[in-house]
């Protein structure tokens, strides 16, 4: 019987990890967690994961540490133009993110070829109640939430969690990079592409993307350390502005903008309150536990 193996990268998100483990426990045979000794800027960081915080799941968790930067880090020269310098900083940040995700393979390789490998960020929780293996690749279409577990971003469906059998998995990042559409039969480039496919299974109501369920200061710290930290630092955003956005129930990041759009961090889409009964069963049954994160 194929097992579901949930694979995530980790920074310091204990509350979200606890929620994830409890929601997915009945479906997932094993959890693989990868933490790095450096952030996306390349700065050294302390390791935050502690098994004692997750004793209930200790026999189902494999925790691995990436302590070596990727080999493709670009050296920033003092003679680089500002544009070249910024481009190298962004590329280096993205490559560190990819390296951490791909290091999950260090543990994935130990599982059976028929096992189902679930690749996601820690805040992307798939609705595995609706999943059954049908096709080589499955993508979960998830509702998007900001700041609070029940503050819904109604304009966006998040193509987050993806699952494939180990025998088909080229790498964790390969699964992450797959285009989120089924291409028609006459697109011959799909025969040669590792991103374009004609037969993906998409799961409607496929889960929940709980983005930035943090305090304003924590969100500010996260944004200064994630792959696109340079854009955030140049945007003028800070903890005070984020706090104002939370109070006004506004999204600050434009997920529809092109990645090169300098204005994608000056967004103000409205969030709406979702009926709490539509939250994951475990979350709805334990609202008191997460009371600070319910609007």
Image (spheres, rainbow, N blue to C red):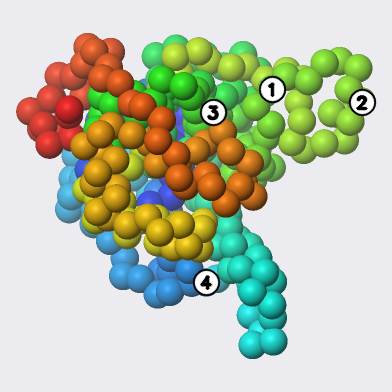
Instruction: Return the x and y of residue 266 as percentages of the image width and height.
Output: 45, 45
Determine the secondary structure under disc 4.
loop
Mark 4 → mark 3, Cα distance in angstroms: 30 Å
N-term-proximal mark, 4 vs 2: 4
Closer to the camera: disc 2 or disc 3?
A: 3
Mark 4 → mark 2, Cα distance in angstroms: 39 Å
Closer to the camera: disc 4 or disc 2?
A: 2
Q: Which residue is mark 3?
A: 159
Q: Which residue is mark 2?
A: 188
Dot 4: few (<14), some (14–19), or many (≥20) neighbours within 10 Å? few
N-term-proximal mark, 3 vs 1: 3
The foreground one among 183 and 263 is 263
Determine the secondary structure under disc 1.
loop
Mark 1 → mark 2, Cα distance in angstroms: 15 Å
Q: Residue at x 62, y 17 (%)?
A: 201
Left or right, 295 with reference to 24: left
Closer to the camera: disc 4 or disc 1?
A: 1
Dot 3: few (<14), some (14–19), or many (≥20) neighbours within 10 Å? many
Q: Residue at x 78, y 20 (%)?
A: 183
Q: Is residue 259 above or below residue 38?
A: above
Mark 4 → mark 1, Cα distance in angstroms: 35 Å
Closer to the camera: disc 4 or disc 3?
A: 3
Dot 1: few (<14), some (14–19), or many (≥20) neighbours within 10 Å? some
The mark total stands at 4
Q: Residue at x 25, y 34 (%)?
A: 248
Mark 2 → mark 3, Cα distance in angstroms: 24 Å
Q: Which residue is mark 4?
A: 68
Q: Which residue is mark 1?
A: 181
N-term-proximal mark, 1 vs 2: 1
Q: Residue at x 44, y 14 (%)?
A: 205
């Amino acid at each position: 019987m194929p097992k579901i193996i949930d694979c995530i990268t980790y920074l310091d998100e204990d509350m979200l990890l606890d929620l994830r483990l409890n929601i997915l426990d009945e479906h997932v045979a094993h959890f693989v967690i990868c933490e790095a000794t450096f952030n996306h800027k390349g700065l050294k960081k302390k390791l935050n994961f502690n098994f004692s915080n997750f004793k209930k799941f200790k026999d189902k968790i494999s925790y691995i540490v990436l302590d070596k930067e990727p080999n493709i880090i670009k050296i920033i020269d003092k003679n680089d133009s500002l544009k070249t310098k910024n481009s190298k900083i962004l590329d280096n940040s993205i490559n560190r993110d990819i390296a951490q995700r791909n290091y999950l393979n260090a543990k994935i390789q130990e599982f059976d070829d028929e096992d189902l490998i679930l690749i996601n960020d820690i805040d992307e929780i798939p609705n595995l109640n609706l999943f059954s293996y049908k096709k080589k690749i499955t993508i979960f279409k998830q509702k998007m939430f900001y700041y609070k577990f029940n503050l819904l971003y109604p304009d966006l469906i998040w193509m987050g969690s993806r699952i494939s059998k180990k025998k088909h998995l080229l790498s964790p990042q390969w699964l992450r990079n797959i285009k989120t559409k089924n291409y028609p039969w006459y697109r011959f480039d799909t025969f040669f592409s590792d991103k374009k496919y004609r037969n993906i299974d998409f799961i409607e109501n496929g889960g929940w993307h709980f983005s930035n369920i943090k305090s304003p200061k924590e969100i500010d710290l996260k944004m200064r350390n994630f792959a696109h930290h340079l854009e955030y630092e140049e945007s003028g955003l800070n903890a005070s502005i984020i706090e104002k956005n939370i109070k006004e129930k506004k999204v600050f990041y434009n997920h529809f903008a092109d990645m090169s759009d300098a204005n994608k961090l000056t967004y103000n889409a409205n969030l709406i309150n979702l009926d709490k009964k539509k939250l994951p069963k475990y979350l709805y049954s334990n609202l008191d536990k997460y009371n600070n994160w319910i609007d």
